[in-house]
Image: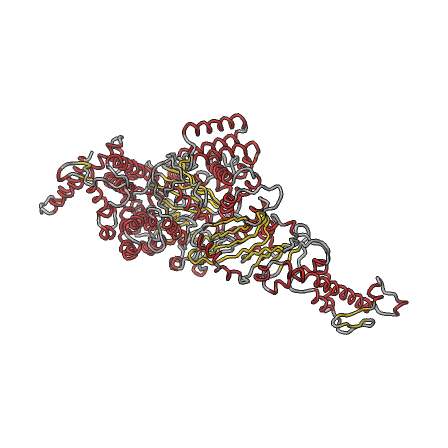
Amino acid sequence: MMQQAMSTLQRVVPAVTRPCTFRNVRRIVRGSRSISRWANALRPRVAPNNVRWVGNLPRVSAAIATSPMYNEERYGVMDSQEVMDNKRQAMVYELEKNNRRAAEEVVPWFLDNMPDDYFKRVPRAMQQKHLQALAGISQTGVPPDLTLVEDDSITVFYPESDKPGVLAELLDRFSRTGFGRTNQSKRKLTSVEVYTSKDGSLTMDILNFADHGQSAEMNDAEHAELFAKVKGSEGTHVTVQVDPQDPTKGVVQVAAANVIKSLALQRTAKYLGMHGVSIVNAVVSSLTDTTNTLGTGNESASVVFMKMEVSFTEKGKALPPLPQMEKELQRVVKWMNDLCFNFAQEHPTISFTDVEIIHALSALQNSRLGLLDPYSFTMTNISQMIRRPQLTQHVASIAALFRARFDPDAPLQGPEYEKQRATLHEAIEKSVSDDKEHQLLAGMLDAVEATLRTNLYLPNRYGLALRLHPSHMGHGTVGTDMPFGVFFVYGRRFKGFHVRFRDIARGGCRVVAPLNPDQHAAESARTFNEAYSLAFAQQLKNKDIPEGGSKAVVLMEPHPSDMVEPDMFGHNFMVRKCVRAFTDGLLDLTIKDPRVVDYYNRDEILYLGPDENIIPQDIDWIIQQGIKRNYNLPQALMSSKPLNGINHKEYGVTSLGVAENLEVALHHLGMHPKDTNKSFSVKLTGGTDGDVAGNMILELAKRFDDKVKVVGMADGTACIEDPDGLNMSELLRMVEDALPLSQFSEAALGPGGSLYLTDKFEGTLKRDTMHNRVPADVFLPCGGRPGTINVRNFREFLTESGEASSTLVVEGANLFITPEARQLLFDEAKVVIVKDSSANKCGVITSSYEILASMLVSPEEFLDMKQELVTDIREQLSRLARVEAESLFNELARDPSVSLPKQSERMSNAVVRLHDAVAETLGKRVAVDAEGKVVDWEQVLVGSGAHALTVGGLLEEVATEHVPHSLLKAVGTTALQALPWPYLRNLIACNLATKVLYTEGLTYVDSLPASEREVADVAFRYVHHSLQVEDLIKQVQGSGIEAADEVTNLLKRVASAASR
């Protein structure tokens, strides 16, 4: 007991008897062990000689207490243990006496000087611990500077003179180190309190990790008003008020939805500190917001409240106007990028708005110039460039020009804008000699001119969004066509592009979330290229629907703070916020607002869909945000809605198209079990818990039963292989339970089967090479990153003898094989590849049908007819997939020297050509009113009299073929006329284009005139003659003549020739 107590004393006494500084030497007082408890722990069981007891305290003779060494002549013979015991008792007595004296001094001061809120909010037990710590500090005679770490709180004491910026530093250190408690930095901060003594000699910062009841006070009127301003949103609200009686004092209040409390407070404290504002007293707490969710489940989000009593008295700091402080702090708390915030602190003469512009334009150049020179134009190098004094001056001028050009009160336009732009260009030419720096500045200046719209002046924007002229970014590496439009959004921890190839376009939105800075740097330069390439592929894929191709790619920046708010995916918290900020930025650019200066002057419609890292909660939020912001077609904004949508995975729509293409390919190549009565082997990338791969297992089992062997699969968790075929029952079980490949039962493996987990190097290597190594008749890439097989590694897909490991590839995943690699595999090994734009198009067709339905019926009506509608859609999908697949293999049979991907591109380009010609001609010939509605549906397009083809008649014919039967039956053809004319124009165009192509073939389409108007006229005549022929065919078939079939075929050929 004595030895343990002595050890405790030796550890603790230095903490209360020596000066402690937060920045240099931190002493930690742990638990609730007071000095009195230490003294009692040291009290001996039996009082030794020369010791008498006064109350509870041992008193040693003065000689022993003061003598540095025992004097044997004076006190007689005593053993060394007794001497040491007496000296210990003396030390305890002196320590207890000093502690009592300190308590008598500290307690009255504590009660007189700590603010009333301290005693109201801080639990009594915590007050006692603070007193114990202060009593210990008071004996040192130095200003208080101490950290007290408890299991559920951290309290930092420091003198008044150290306050500005200390809270921000404290939170930064906590987030990185947890003050020596490794688990604390991972725990969730529940509240923060700051108290300054009335005499100004002491400040306490209290970080709580347990609920001490602070949330109960959120029901007062003040908090209710703040809560109402941000509940159910991603917004922030800030007020900065000056005390009318004392202009050196004020109150800052912040309400912020869905923020990490410690990071929001850290940013607020840092912003106030940079302006010399001291936080005197503060309370930070939160309230659950049941009207909002954030995360992978339905857990409620929260609103964080900060109320800070501040002092504006630091010398040498110019305080911005209060409205400016409110505006800047509103952005800093949640939405301003860390790079921007740091840059603003380094360059206080540049406004926060201009800092955001600078970084948005430089991030844009990272994706534009970095594609050509990824080493020179990394974000790190660009950040260093713009910090060089000479370049800082130029980028600030570019930002000022951008800001002036889009000022809604007085936009800088015409000759004056051109003059200022030319002056700035000349200054850059004269003063910047470094080629890379010149390219950067020139690109940023060009981006000012290329920006057609921006949300810069919208007060509640989440990020900075730009609608760019597509020529500024140009094209990517997959195609050379210029996109129709490019949207760019830059915000906190993300940047994103939305690339579209038509004014009405559809494509998914994906989030790329690297886990470390190196991965992020590699992805950053190619973000636009990925968006362009996927949009280009989508354009080819979307030939059967009204919408052209588009794609949105959001790149999230990794940061250690991702782990401050734990969740099952690590990045999940920030991924959700990036998705919301990006899509809200797109809404900013498409919803009319007088504060948005518009140099484009055309309405635009958004159609998005889910892709990588987009979850159902994101879809719901995007729809609700569209409704809240009065977007014209909110239900059409996002497809695959959890309730009133068609979930691709649930209904297996993408895999349905892949399976139809596989069946057609097997028949044409003589490999179908029905033709050979033999089984065939398949390997897949993608997991049994995935959409395409999982549903493909179901399709294979249903269509081919025991005539198919799955010999290999690979996903992010594992690789499984068996040359005799994996156990199909086990695969079906895993699909049913949505389990990844790592959960494959080893007991279900055959004698030659292997399971490799990717948590080991060998497993990762096997996973990454399975698609090349394992021989199979068919390869179905149903998951994996774009460009997995490329021009550098395509030969790994071949055996040592030069034969392909699979002779047939049907692409369920987009761009798994690059265009160059596809051609090389065909040239060197005659690999037949059914390209992604043909094989997996049924997913986007489903989304298009879903959005069409959402524009025609209410969510309730949709749910009532959903099952019937899905059945109709699946029938349409099978038909569209088969008719294109048959056309492709017919073209391959006609000319075997041309690879199937080339034939697929030819067909897609032919449809695009026909589509654009018809849409453009309809746009010119059909009159619309100010609201965009067709003036005269009876306008004649071709023919005359009773057989004339009118605009309304053409729409009715298209609706009969394109719109699912159950939907058309529910709404009627007339309801279609209420849809936006640009959509209807494209609906007519896509239907005519695919009808002509699939019926007549590529040779026919290639022979059409070059003139856009003439091509459109051919298409109109084709429909017109087809309708007439259909009437004649009905008459012939009903006439009962023997040659009815021969006459019917003759009439069809005549109709084709007559349309030319």
Residue 484 visible in the picture = yes
Residue positioned 13% across, 45% down in the render: 1034
Quadrant of the rendered image containing residue 643: bottom left
Which residue ends up furthest to the front in the rendered image?
A: 245
- Tally the numbered discs: 0
Position in image of residue 779 (x %, y %):
38, 47
Give the camera-side residue of 269 and 74: 269
Q: Position of residue 543 (x, y in %)?
A: 30, 41
Q: Position of residue 320 (x, y in %)?
A: 54, 42
- Seen from the viewer's position, the closer of residues 983 and 716 is 983
Please tell me which residue is depicted at 54% across the width and 58% down the height of the picture: 190
| Direction from residue 617 to residue 989 in the image, left or right | left
What is the x, y in percent for residue 140? 73, 56
Let me know if residue 777 appears in the view. no
The quarter of the displayed image where residue 701 is located: bottom left
- Left or right: 813 as drawn, with respect to 959: right
Considering only vertical position in the picture, is 154 above or below 1033?
below
